[in-house]
Image: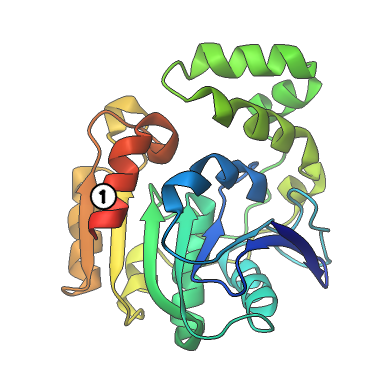
Amino acid sequence: MRHHQTGHTAWWMTGPAPDLVLLHGFSDAADCWTPLLPGLAGLGGTLAIDARGHGASALPRGPVGPAPQAADVAAALEPVTTGPAVIVGHSMGAVTAAQLAADRPDLVSALVLEDPPCDAYADGTVRGVPHWLATARATPYPDRIAACREQNPRWPTDELAPWATAKTDIDPEYCRRPTAPAPPLTIILAAVACPVLLLHGSPQHGGMVTPADADALRRAGDGRLTAVRLPNAGHNPRREARKDFLNALHAW
Protein backbone atom coordinates (compact mmCIF):
# COMPACT_ATOMS: atom_id res chain seq x y z
CA MET A 1 0.00 0.00 0.00
CA ARG A 2 1.47 3.36 -1.08
CA HIS A 3 0.32 6.66 0.44
CA HIS A 4 0.13 9.81 -1.67
CA GLN A 5 -1.03 13.43 -1.57
CA THR A 6 -2.53 15.31 -4.51
CA GLY A 7 -3.07 18.93 -3.53
CA HIS A 8 -5.14 18.82 -0.36
CA THR A 9 -6.30 15.22 -0.99
CA ALA A 10 -4.65 12.21 0.66
CA TRP A 11 -5.04 8.74 -0.79
CA TRP A 12 -3.47 5.29 -0.88
CA MET A 13 -3.26 2.68 -3.59
CA THR A 14 -2.52 -1.00 -3.96
CA GLY A 15 -1.27 -2.20 -7.32
CA PRO A 16 0.22 -0.22 -10.20
CA ALA A 17 -3.06 1.42 -11.29
CA PRO A 18 -6.58 1.73 -9.89
CA ASP A 19 -9.27 -0.67 -11.06
CA LEU A 20 -11.41 0.10 -8.01
CA VAL A 21 -11.76 3.50 -6.31
CA LEU A 22 -13.19 3.50 -2.78
CA LEU A 23 -14.98 6.56 -1.33
CA HIS A 24 -15.92 6.48 2.35
CA GLY A 25 -18.89 7.96 4.17
CA PHE A 26 -19.13 11.00 6.45
CA SER A 27 -16.77 10.85 9.46
CA ASP A 28 -14.99 7.73 8.11
CA ALA A 29 -11.66 7.72 6.25
CA ALA A 30 -9.88 5.79 3.51
CA ASP A 31 -8.47 3.37 6.10
CA CYS A 32 -12.02 2.27 6.91
CA TRP A 33 -11.85 0.24 3.68
CA THR A 34 -8.78 -1.79 4.71
CA PRO A 35 -10.81 -4.61 6.34
CA LEU A 36 -12.47 -5.22 2.97
CA LEU A 37 -9.24 -5.53 0.96
CA PRO A 38 -8.86 -9.33 1.29
CA GLY A 39 -12.37 -9.72 -0.12
CA LEU A 40 -11.53 -7.46 -3.06
CA ALA A 41 -8.45 -9.47 -4.00
CA GLY A 42 -8.44 -10.42 -7.66
CA LEU A 43 -10.40 -7.35 -8.75
CA GLY A 44 -7.26 -5.32 -9.51
CA GLY A 45 -5.54 -2.32 -8.01
CA THR A 46 -7.43 -0.35 -5.37
CA LEU A 47 -7.29 3.38 -4.66
CA ALA A 48 -8.94 4.79 -1.52
CA ILE A 49 -9.35 8.52 -0.95
CA ASP A 50 -9.75 10.59 2.21
CA ALA A 51 -12.54 13.08 1.51
CA ARG A 52 -11.68 16.71 2.14
CA GLY A 53 -11.47 17.38 5.87
CA HIS A 54 -11.38 13.66 6.63
CA GLY A 55 -8.46 11.37 7.42
CA ALA A 56 -5.21 12.96 6.25
CA SER A 57 -6.86 15.27 3.69
CA ALA A 58 -6.81 18.99 4.36
CA LEU A 59 -9.95 21.11 4.21
CA PRO A 60 -9.63 23.72 1.45
CA ARG A 61 -11.65 26.89 1.34
CA GLY A 62 -15.12 26.70 -0.08
CA PRO A 63 -18.14 24.48 0.36
CA VAL A 64 -18.29 20.73 0.84
CA GLY A 65 -20.67 18.38 -0.95
CA PRO A 66 -20.91 16.04 -3.96
CA ALA A 67 -19.63 18.39 -6.70
CA PRO A 68 -16.49 19.74 -4.98
CA GLN A 69 -15.68 16.32 -3.54
CA ALA A 70 -16.14 14.65 -6.92
CA ALA A 71 -13.65 17.18 -8.31
CA ASP A 72 -11.20 16.13 -5.57
CA VAL A 73 -11.56 12.49 -6.65
CA ALA A 74 -10.99 13.38 -10.30
CA ALA A 75 -7.84 15.34 -9.43
CA ALA A 76 -6.42 12.39 -7.47
CA LEU A 77 -7.42 9.82 -10.08
CA GLU A 78 -6.33 11.54 -13.28
CA PRO A 79 -2.53 11.28 -12.79
CA VAL A 80 -2.61 7.53 -12.05
CA THR A 81 -5.48 6.16 -14.11
CA THR A 82 -4.88 3.91 -17.10
CA GLY A 83 -8.58 3.75 -17.95
CA PRO A 84 -12.00 4.12 -16.40
CA ALA A 85 -12.38 2.54 -12.95
CA VAL A 86 -15.20 1.06 -10.90
CA ILE A 87 -16.09 3.60 -8.22
CA VAL A 88 -17.39 2.19 -4.93
CA GLY A 89 -18.91 4.68 -2.50
CA HIS A 90 -20.58 4.42 0.89
CA SER A 91 -23.22 6.91 2.03
CA MET A 92 -21.73 10.39 1.42
CA GLY A 93 -19.11 8.73 -0.78
CA ALA A 94 -21.82 7.04 -2.85
CA VAL A 95 -23.33 10.39 -3.82
CA THR A 96 -19.84 11.72 -4.57
CA ALA A 97 -19.27 8.65 -6.79
CA ALA A 98 -22.51 9.25 -8.69
CA GLN A 99 -21.64 12.92 -9.16
CA LEU A 100 -18.21 11.93 -10.48
CA ALA A 101 -19.81 9.55 -12.99
CA ALA A 102 -22.15 12.31 -14.17
CA ASP A 103 -19.39 14.92 -14.40
CA ARG A 104 -16.50 12.77 -15.63
CA PRO A 105 -17.79 9.67 -17.44
CA ASP A 106 -14.30 9.18 -18.90
CA LEU A 107 -13.05 8.20 -15.44
CA VAL A 108 -15.87 5.80 -14.47
CA SER A 109 -16.66 2.38 -15.91
CA ALA A 110 -19.25 1.40 -13.29
CA LEU A 111 -20.66 2.51 -9.92
CA VAL A 112 -21.28 0.59 -6.70
CA LEU A 113 -23.43 2.59 -4.28
CA GLU A 114 -23.53 1.35 -0.67
CA ASP A 115 -26.67 2.59 1.12
CA PRO A 116 -26.62 6.17 -0.23
CA PRO A 117 -28.73 9.05 1.08
CA CYS A 118 -31.19 9.84 -1.68
CA ASP A 119 -31.77 13.57 -1.08
CA ALA A 120 -29.33 14.90 1.50
CA TYR A 121 -27.81 17.89 -0.29
CA ALA A 122 -30.78 19.86 -1.57
CA ASP A 123 -29.81 23.08 0.17
CA GLY A 124 -26.70 24.80 1.46
CA THR A 125 -27.48 24.19 5.13
CA VAL A 126 -24.62 24.50 7.60
CA ARG A 127 -25.36 21.58 9.92
CA GLY A 128 -22.70 21.83 12.63
CA VAL A 129 -20.97 18.96 14.39
CA PRO A 130 -23.52 16.20 15.14
CA HIS A 131 -23.95 15.34 18.80
CA TRP A 132 -22.96 11.71 18.24
CA LEU A 133 -19.73 12.76 16.55
CA ALA A 134 -18.87 15.30 19.25
CA THR A 135 -19.46 12.59 21.86
CA ALA A 136 -17.28 10.08 20.02
CA ARG A 137 -14.47 12.62 19.64
CA ALA A 138 -14.58 13.41 23.36
CA THR A 139 -14.49 9.74 24.36
CA PRO A 140 -11.08 8.15 25.07
CA TYR A 141 -9.99 5.75 22.34
CA PRO A 142 -10.46 2.48 24.30
CA ASP A 143 -13.94 3.57 25.39
CA ARG A 144 -14.74 4.61 21.82
CA ILE A 145 -13.82 1.10 20.64
CA ALA A 146 -15.96 -0.45 23.38
CA ALA A 147 -18.92 1.79 22.53
CA CYS A 148 -18.65 0.94 18.83
CA ARG A 149 -18.61 -2.77 19.69
CA GLU A 150 -21.68 -2.39 21.92
CA GLN A 151 -23.61 -0.36 19.35
CA ASN A 152 -22.62 -2.55 16.39
CA PRO A 153 -22.40 -6.13 17.64
CA ARG A 154 -22.48 -7.59 14.10
CA TRP A 155 -19.43 -5.66 12.90
CA PRO A 156 -16.25 -7.74 12.52
CA THR A 157 -13.59 -6.77 15.05
CA ASP A 158 -11.27 -5.41 12.35
CA GLU A 159 -13.81 -2.66 11.59
CA LEU A 160 -13.63 -1.07 15.03
CA ALA A 161 -10.16 0.54 15.07
CA PRO A 162 -10.42 2.30 11.66
CA TRP A 163 -13.87 3.62 12.58
CA ALA A 164 -12.68 4.89 15.98
CA THR A 165 -9.54 6.53 14.57
CA ALA A 166 -11.46 8.31 11.83
CA LYS A 167 -13.68 10.07 14.35
CA THR A 168 -10.77 12.12 15.69
CA ASP A 169 -9.13 12.58 12.29
CA ILE A 170 -12.08 14.49 10.80
CA ASP A 171 -11.72 18.27 10.89
CA PRO A 172 -14.79 19.57 12.80
CA GLU A 173 -14.74 22.62 10.53
CA TYR A 174 -16.03 20.32 7.76
CA CYS A 175 -19.35 20.21 9.59
CA ARG A 176 -19.50 24.01 9.76
CA ARG A 177 -18.99 24.58 6.04
CA PRO A 178 -21.93 25.27 3.73
CA THR A 179 -22.88 22.41 1.45
CA ALA A 180 -22.85 23.00 -2.30
CA PRO A 181 -26.48 22.21 -3.23
CA ALA A 182 -26.96 19.03 -5.25
CA PRO A 183 -30.09 17.51 -6.79
CA PRO A 184 -31.61 14.27 -5.51
CA LEU A 185 -29.69 11.11 -6.33
CA THR A 186 -32.34 10.13 -8.89
CA ILE A 187 -31.52 13.26 -10.91
CA ILE A 188 -27.78 12.62 -10.70
CA LEU A 189 -28.22 8.99 -11.81
CA ALA A 190 -30.35 10.04 -14.76
CA ALA A 191 -27.20 11.72 -16.12
CA VAL A 192 -25.02 8.62 -15.55
CA ALA A 193 -24.42 6.31 -18.52
CA CYS A 194 -22.49 3.47 -16.86
CA PRO A 195 -23.83 0.36 -15.05
CA VAL A 196 -24.76 0.88 -11.39
CA LEU A 197 -25.02 -1.59 -8.51
CA LEU A 198 -27.05 -0.40 -5.52
CA LEU A 199 -26.27 -2.40 -2.37
CA HIS A 200 -28.50 -1.29 0.47
CA GLY A 201 -29.73 -2.40 3.85
CA SER A 202 -33.18 -2.34 5.42
CA PRO A 203 -34.71 0.73 7.08
CA GLN A 204 -35.68 -1.34 10.12
CA HIS A 205 -31.96 -1.88 10.73
CA GLY A 206 -31.01 1.75 10.04
CA GLY A 207 -30.66 1.64 6.28
CA MET A 208 -31.25 4.89 4.38
CA VAL A 209 -32.81 3.38 1.23
CA THR A 210 -36.53 2.61 1.52
CA PRO A 211 -38.31 0.29 -0.95
CA ALA A 212 -39.79 3.38 -2.61
CA ASP A 213 -36.31 4.91 -2.88
CA ALA A 214 -34.96 1.72 -4.49
CA ASP A 215 -37.79 1.74 -7.04
CA ALA A 216 -37.14 5.40 -7.86
CA LEU A 217 -33.43 4.77 -8.30
CA ARG A 218 -34.16 1.80 -10.60
CA ARG A 219 -36.34 4.03 -12.77
CA ALA A 220 -33.68 6.74 -12.81
CA GLY A 221 -31.09 4.14 -13.81
CA ASP A 222 -33.22 3.31 -16.87
CA GLY A 223 -32.17 -0.35 -17.02
CA ARG A 224 -28.55 0.31 -16.01
CA LEU A 225 -29.12 -0.04 -12.25
CA THR A 226 -29.22 -3.34 -10.37
CA ALA A 227 -30.52 -3.09 -6.79
CA VAL A 228 -29.66 -5.68 -4.16
CA ARG A 229 -31.14 -5.40 -0.68
CA LEU A 230 -29.24 -7.08 2.14
CA PRO A 231 -32.13 -7.66 4.57
CA ASN A 232 -30.00 -8.20 7.69
CA ALA A 233 -27.94 -5.05 7.17
CA GLY A 234 -28.61 -1.38 7.87
CA HIS A 235 -26.59 1.65 6.81
CA ASN A 236 -23.26 -0.23 6.71
CA PRO A 237 -23.91 -3.35 4.62
CA ARG A 238 -20.22 -4.19 4.14
CA ARG A 239 -19.72 -4.06 7.92
CA GLU A 240 -22.96 -5.70 8.98
CA ALA A 241 -23.13 -8.38 6.28
CA ARG A 242 -19.63 -8.51 4.79
CA LYS A 243 -19.95 -11.94 3.17
CA ASP A 244 -23.27 -11.07 1.51
CA PHE A 245 -21.92 -7.68 0.41
CA LEU A 246 -18.85 -9.25 -1.22
CA ASN A 247 -20.85 -12.05 -2.82
CA ALA A 248 -23.20 -9.52 -4.41
CA LEU A 249 -20.31 -7.38 -5.59
CA HIS A 250 -18.40 -10.29 -7.14
CA ALA A 251 -21.53 -11.74 -8.75
CA TRP A 252 -22.34 -8.40 -10.36
The percent position of residue 122, horizontal first and vertical second, equals: 49, 60
| Count of numbered circles on the image | 1
| Residue type marked 1 | Ala
In the picture shown, does residue 131 fall above or below 176? above
Q: Left of 193 or right of it: where is 171?
A: right
Q: Nearer the viewer, residue 36 or 213?
A: 36
Q: Quadrant of the C terminus?
A: bottom left
* View extreme (bottom): residue: 106
Q: Nearer the viewer, residue 193 or 156?
A: 156
Q: Left of 17 or right of it: where is 210?
A: left
Residue at the image point whose x is 71% and y is 23% from the top:
136
Is residue 200 visible to the viewer in this orientation of the structure?
A: no
In the picture shown, does residue 178 fall above or below 104? above
The percent position of residue 31, horizontal first and vertical second, equals: 66, 45
For disc 1, the neighbor class at 10 Å (few under 14, some 14 to 19, many from 20) is some
Q: Quadrant of the N terminus?
A: bottom right
Is residue 85 visible to the viewer in this orientation of the structure?
A: yes
The kind of secondary structure element at disc 1 is: helix
Residue at the image point whose x is 38% and y is 60% from the top:
112
The percent position of residue 156, horizontal first and vertical second, equals: 48, 25
Residue at the image point whose x is 57% and y is 28% from the top:
158
In the picture shown, does residue 71 fall above or below 120? below
Residue at the image point whose x is 45% and y is 54% from the top:
41
Colour logic: rainbow
- The residue tagged 1 is 248
Q: Left of 16 or right of it: where is 41?
A: left
The percent position of residue 68, horizontal first and vertical second, equals: 65, 71
